[in-house]
Amino acid sequence: MARRTLIGALVALAVAFAALASASAAPLRGTRVEDSFPSRAIAGHLPFSVYLPPGYTSGTRRYPVIYFLHGLPASVSAHRDIAYIGSALEAGQLQAIIISPQGARDGDTDPEYLDWGRGRNWETAVATELPRVVDSRYRTIALRGGRALIGVSAGGYGAAVIGLHHLDAFSVIESWSGYFHPTDPSGARPLPRGSDIEDAFASAHSFVSQLRIEFADDPTFLGFYVGDRDATFLAENERFARELSRAHVPFTFQVYRGGHTRSLWQGQATAWLTLAVDHLAPAA
């Protein structure tokens, strides 16, 4: 099954490649806005960037939502960097809303999208509070089948662990050059959570054995990729793929030529967004 889904990824890449070549320089036809809400989880306002597809402002259709998590450590404005994601959607003629929340604040630049306690509960903010706000303010398909969680680098880790913790909320999970256990800012050392139980809960590896049953109950598309010159995260991505295969969990995985770079993520964006949207409820 993993092999069949991998072939699907390659086909999507081939179809999208020609359009992607000119997409990065094309101006967005959709609309970008900035929004925020008062979050109890992080004890302050959580800003987020929004991309609305062409036709949104003059129509009545409801759209699936792609929640996109940026990398860490990061500045307070890193969530605003979504133009290339919008361009990739438009290159693939894909209809979806993009929501990119802030994932770090001044003095707290690498919280790894996890819950740390009062005022630092980033997972709760992203997985619970944010979708509730977005569904109330925008014309979304307000069901798990209308939500994808995608991230790059540390955002890929956030997408994986939050998605697996909240399978009732997201039906598509993608990690782009991410990892599957929390790390320190270097990416090379584990980030302790305070106890063995907390460490296990923060590791996507801990959930593999139960995913076959959970995905049968809640159909989920799980996909991830990494560059072959990504010295920090290649080995763990390959390990995660082996674990999923042994547990007979359906997934899509690919290793591309490249490193841990923006050029890799931008180059693969249309293909992987196509995979995501193809597994979401369509705009209607």
Image (cartoon, rainbow, N blue to C red):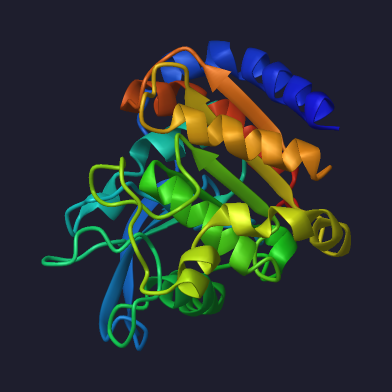
Query: Which residue shows up at 51% across the image and 36% down it?
Result: 236
Rendering quarter of residue 247: top right
Task: Determine whether, in the image, residue 97 is placed left or right of residue 152.
Answer: right
User: Quick one: which residue is furthest to the left in this view?
Assistant: 107
Q: Nearer the viewer, residue 263 or 195?
A: 195
Q: Is residue 230 left or right of residue 244?
A: left
Image vertical order of residue 272 relative to residue 179, above or below: above
Q: Horizontal placement of 246 versus 112: left or right?
A: right
Seen at 53% across and 59% down, the residue is: 161
From the viewer's perspective, is residue 31 above or below residue 197?
above
> Does residue 93 appear in this view?
no
Residue 234 in the image: state x and y as whole percent.
47, 27
Of the pair 14 and 96, the residue shown nearer to us = 14
The quadrant of the picture occupied by the N terminus is top right
Numbered disc total: 0
Residue at (12% x, 65% y) in the render? 106
Res. 76 in view: yes
Identify the image quadrant of the C terminus. bottom right
Q: Give percent across and percent down for residue 191.
A: 33, 58
Q: Could you tell whether 236 is left or right of 186 in the image?
A: right
Residue 51: % across, % down: 43, 51
Q: Residue at x 38, y 34 (%)?
A: 84
Q: Quadrant of residue 18?
A: top right
Quick one: 247 or 79, which is closer to the camera? 247
Image location of residue 135, percent across then percent down: 56, 74
